[in-house]
C-alpha cells in the first residue's frame, strides 16, 4: 500500500470559488541526540540529563536532570551566592560552565525533590533560551559535570521503576505525546488512573476469589464433607462475584473497537467503477495531488492512503483502483483491483463513488453492496438538475459543488463510528465507569482473562473434584489483568515501549 508521507490534513470545507489548500505540518518529535538502545535494560542509579524540548532553535528550551547528582550539578553551574530554590519554585539562575566559568545563559531553574518528582528521584530543570549556542553550552556543562546523557524514554522508565507510573500510565503518556488529533488526546488523558483503578479492582476480586478456592483445596483434603459436591456451597459468593466480573469483561470487550479506531485511525476506502472520480475526491480531501487523475479509465493501480483529521478523528483515507474485470483488464490493473477489494474488505467505512457510468443508482437505488456506508454521486456538473436524486451526496470535483456537504457527512459517519470520545459529557455520562480499550495488547489480555473465567465457571459445576483446576483459571485471569497495568511480568513490553519514547521524556 502506498502511503503518502504528507502531514495530517484537516479537510477544509470548500466553496465554489475557493479551493483552499491547507498544508498543516504535523508536530515532529525530533531528537536532540540519537540513541537507539533501550533504557530499561540496564537501569542504573546514576544521574542523567537530556534536552526535553525539540531541537534548537526555539524561544525557550528545557534541559532536565534526574538522579542524586541533579541538585549538586545545579550548584556547580551557578555562582556561590546562588541559593537553591525551594522545591517547585522557579528561581532566576545565571549559569556558568563549572570548569571554564564561561557564562552560559540567564535562565530559570526549578527543582523537584524525590520522591515527589516525575521520576521519583531528585530532578532539576533548566529553563533556558532555545538557541543552539545556549543549549549546546548548557548540555556540555552538564556533561562535563559528570552526568550521563539519557537514553530514549529513560526519565519515564525511571518513573516506572520507582512506581510513579504503572505500565498502563506509561502507555497513556506515550499516546498523549504522539497524539495527532483531539480525540486521541482526550482518549490518552482519560485512560490512565481511572482505568488502572478499574483493572486493579478486577484483579483484587480475582485474588480474593483465588484465596477462597485455595482455602477450599486445603480444607477439602482433610474433610469428608458431602456438601463439597455442590458448587454454590463450595464457592459461596465467589461464584457470583466471578460471574459478575466475567460479564463486566464481556461488555468491556464489546466496545465496538472505538479506542483502537481512535488510536490507529479509522480506515476509509474510496471505491467504485473506473473513472468515477475517486482520485479527484482524495486530492480534494487531502488538499494536494496525491493521486493521478486522468480521463483514461483504470488509471489508479496502487492503493494511495492519506491521513486526514475529520472532526478530531484520525482517518486513513485510501484511493483504490476502479473495480472492473474482463478481457480488457491487463495483469497489472487486475492486481490493482485485487488490492482495492482487499482494502474495501478491511475498511471501517466504505465510500462508493458513482460517476456517470453509475447513473442508474442515483434515483434511490442503493445497490446491492451492503458494505457501503456512504454513496457519493460525482460529476454533478455534467448531470441535468432533475437527474440528481435524493439518495447519497451529489458533488462536483470540477466546480466544488457539494464538497462541503461531503466532508460534513463523512465526518458524521466517522464520528458515529467512534462514539462520543472527546465530545461533551452528558449528565448521564458523568461519573460513569465505562472505559474503552485503547490498545490491542490490552484487549488480548482481557480476552484471555475472560476465557479463563468461562473455563472457571464450567469447572465450578463439577464441584470439589475440579476445584484445583478452577483455582488455576482464577490465577490465569488475575495474571492476565495484572499484565495490562504492568503488575506482573511485563519486561518484553517495556523494552519496545520505552524505545518508542523520545530522548528527554
Ligand atoms: N466534469 C467532471 N469531471 C470530473 C469530475 N471528477 C472527476 N472528473 C474527471 O473524470 C476523470 C476521471 O477522474 P479520476 O479521479 O481519475 O477517476 P477515478 O475514479 O480515480 O478513476 P480510476 O483511477 O480509473 O478508477 C478525469 O478526467 C477527471 O478530471 C467532476 O466532478 N466533473
Ligand atoms: Mg483513480
Image: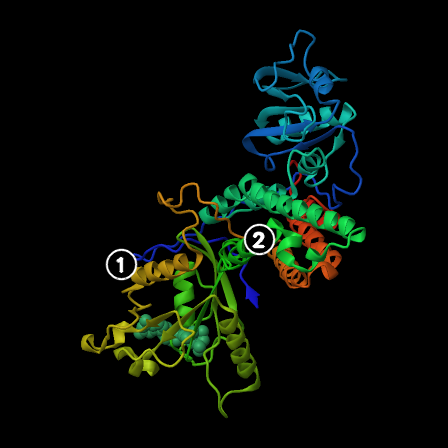
Residue lying at the far left of the rendered structure: 386
Quadrant position of residue 389? bottom left
Seen in the image, is 481 located left or right of residue 27? Answer: right
**Secondary element at tag 2:** helix
Give me the disc on residue 17. 1
Query: 122 above or below 29?
Result: above
Quadrant position of residue 98? top right
**Of residues 91 and 374, which is closer to you in this image?**
374
Question: Cβ(mark 1) to ligand 1 < 8 Å?
Answer: no
**Secondary element at tag 1:** loop
**Of residues 169 and 385, which is closer to you in this image?**
169
Q: Position of residue 159 (x, y in %)?
A: 67, 34
Say which residue appears at 50% left-offset and 49% top-offset: 435
Q: Quadrant of ligand 2?
A: bottom left
Task: Compare marks 1 and 2 and give the one earlier in the sequence.
Answer: 1
Q: CA distance from mark 1 to mark 2?
A: 66 Å
**Of residues 40 and 424, which is closer to you in this image?**
424
Query: 348 above or below 94?
Result: below
Give me the disc on residue 240. 2
Q: Position of residue 123 (x, y in %)?
A: 67, 25
Q: Do the residues bearing badges 1 and 2 touch, measured as CB atoms within 8 Å?
A: no
Question: Which colour style is shown?
Answer: rainbow
Is residue 29 visible from the viewing direction of this image?
no
**Of residues 330 and 216, which is closer to you in this image?**
216
Amino acid at each position: 500500500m502506498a502511503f503518502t508521507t504528507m502531514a495530517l490534513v484537516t479537510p477544509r470545507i470548500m466553496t465554489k470559488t475557493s479551493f483552499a489548500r491547507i498544508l498543516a505540518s504535523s508536530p515532529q518529535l525530533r531528537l536532540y541526540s540519537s540513541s537507539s538502545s533501550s533504557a530499561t535494560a540496564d537501569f542504573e542509579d546514576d544521574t542523567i540529563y537530556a534536552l526535553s524540548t525539540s531541537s534548537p532553535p526555539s524561544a525557550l528550551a528545557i534541559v532536565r536532570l534526574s538522579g542524586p547528582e541533579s541538585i549538586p550539578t545545579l550548584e556547580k553551574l551557578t555562582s556561590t551566592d546562588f541559593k537553591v530554590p525551594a522545591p517547585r519554585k522557579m528561581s532566576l539562575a545565571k549559569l556558568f560552565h563549572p570548569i571554564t566559568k564561561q557564562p552560559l545563559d540567564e535562565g530559570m531553574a526549578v527543582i523537584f525533590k524525590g520522591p515527589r518528582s516525575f521520576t521519583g528521584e531528585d530532578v532539576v530543570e533548566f529553563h533556558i533560551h532555545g538557541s543552539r549556542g545556549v543549549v549546546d553550552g548548557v548540555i556540555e556543562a552538564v556533561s562535563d559535570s559528570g552526568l550521563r546523557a539519557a537514553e530514549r524514554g529513560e526519565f519515564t522508565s525511571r518513573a516506572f521503576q520507582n512506581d510513579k507510573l504503572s505500565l498502563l500510565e506509561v502507555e497513556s503518556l506515550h499516546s498523549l505525546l504522539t497524539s495527532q488529533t483531539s480525540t486521541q488526546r482526550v482518549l490518552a488523558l482519560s485512560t490512565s488512573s481511572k482505568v488502572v483503578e478499574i483493572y486493579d479492582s478486577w484483579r483484587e476480586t480475582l485474588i480474593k476469589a483465588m484465596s477462597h478456592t485455595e482455602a477450599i483445596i486445603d480444607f477439602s483434603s482433610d474433610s469428608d464433607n458431602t456438601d463439597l459436591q455442590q458448587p454454590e456451597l463450595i464457592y459461596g459468593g465467589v461464584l457470583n462475584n466471578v460471574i459478575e466480573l466475567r460479564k463486566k469483561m464481556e461488555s468491556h470487550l464489546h466496545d465496538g473497537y472505538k479506542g483502537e479506531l481512535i488510536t490507529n485511525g479509522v480506515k476509509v476506502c474510496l471505491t467504485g467503477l473506473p473513472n468515477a472520480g475517486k482520485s479527484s475526491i482524495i486530492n480534494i480531501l487531502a488538499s494536494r495531488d496525491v493521486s493521478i487523475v486522468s480521463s483514461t479509465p483504470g488509471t489508479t493501480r496502487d492503493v494511495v492512503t492519506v491521513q486526514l483529521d475529520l472532526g478530531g478523528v484520525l482517518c486513513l483515507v485510501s484511493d483504490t483502483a476502479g473495480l472492473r474485470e474482463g478481457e480488457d483488464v491487463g495483469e497489472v490493473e487486475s492486481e490493482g483491483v485485487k488490492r482495492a477489494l482487499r482494502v474495501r474488505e478491511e475498511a471501517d467505512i466504505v465510500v462508493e463513488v458513482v460517476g456517470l457510468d453509475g447513473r442508474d443508482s442515483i434515483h434511490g437505488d442503493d445497490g446491492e453492496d451492503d458494505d457501503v456506508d456512504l454513496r457519493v454521486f460525482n460529476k454533478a456538473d455534467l448531470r441535468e438538475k432533475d437527474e440528481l436524486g435524493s439518495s447519497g451526496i451529489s458533488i462536483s470535483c470540477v466546480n466544488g459543488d457539494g464538497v462541503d456537504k461531503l466532508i460534513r457527512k463523512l465526518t458524521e459517519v466517522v464520528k458515529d463510528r467512534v462514539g462520543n470520545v472527546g465530545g461533551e459529557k452528558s449528565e448521564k455520562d458523568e461519573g460513569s465507569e465505562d472505559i474503552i480499550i485503547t490498545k490491542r495488547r490490552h484487549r488480548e489480555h482481557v480476552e484471555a482473562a475472560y476465557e479463563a473465567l468461562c473455563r472457571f465457571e464450567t469447572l465450578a459445576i463439577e464441584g470439589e473434584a475440579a476445584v484445583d483446576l478452577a483455582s488455576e483459571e482464577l490465577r490465569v485471569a488475575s495474571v492476565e489483568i495484572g499484565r495490562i497495568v504492568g503488575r506482573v511480568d511485563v519486561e518484553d513490553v517495556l523494552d519496545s515501549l520505552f524505545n518508542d519514547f523520545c530522548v528527554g521524556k
